[in-house]
Image (cartoon, rainbow, N blue to C red):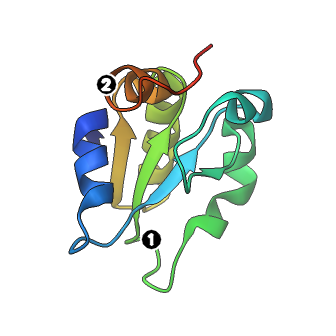
Amino acid sequence: MQQITAPELRAWLDDPARPKPLLLDVREPWEFDVCRIPGAQPMTMRSIPARFMELQSENGREREIVVICHHGARSYQVAMFLAHQGFSNLYNLYGGIAAWAQQVDPAMPTY
């Protein structure tokens, strides 16, 4: 599992030559309703153990996944869990959605 900063993720998403990762937002529904990165898929942290198989793609567990939460702690734990389940291309959004709002999208609502 690797850490990725908000500006690095923005550059990745803006790069037309690079396949887009799955943006896995593990926050609670009310948090996701307040703000989100466009295209992010919500799946609460507590639901991951029962639903992680849904994250596999046609490439199995090789899919690039960026895990997102509020400040980066829950997403780090989820990324570690997924790594233990055999997922190999995992990124934790360092600083979470708060860092995204601060460094990439200052117009984004915060909480």
Image quadrant occupied by the C terminus: top right
Question: On screen, 31 above or below 57?
Answer: above
Q: CA distance from mark 2 to mark 1?
A: 30 Å
The residue tagged 1 is 61
Residue 58 visible in the snapshot: yes
Q: Residue at x 66, y 37 (%)?
A: 45
Residue 97: x and y in percent read 48, 29
Q: Is residue 63 above or below residue 102?
A: below
Name the residue located 66 percent from the left edge and 68 percent from the top edge: 54
x and y percent of residue 15 in the render? 23, 63
Q: Horizontally, is 38 left or right of 52 in the view?
A: left
Residue at 43 percent across and 41 percent down: it is 80
| Mark 1 residue type | Arg
Mark sitting on residue 70: none
Residue 103 marker: 2
Q: Amino acid under label 2?
A: Gln
Front-lying residue, 15 or 97: 15
- Disc 2 or 1, which lies upstream in sequence? 1
In front of the other: 107 or 22: 107
Residue 81, x across and y down, in percent: 50, 44
- Which residue does the image show at 58% across and 65% down from the upper left? 55
- Is 70 on the left or on the right of 89, as rendered? right
Circle 1 residues within 10 Å: few <14, some 14–19, many ≥20: some
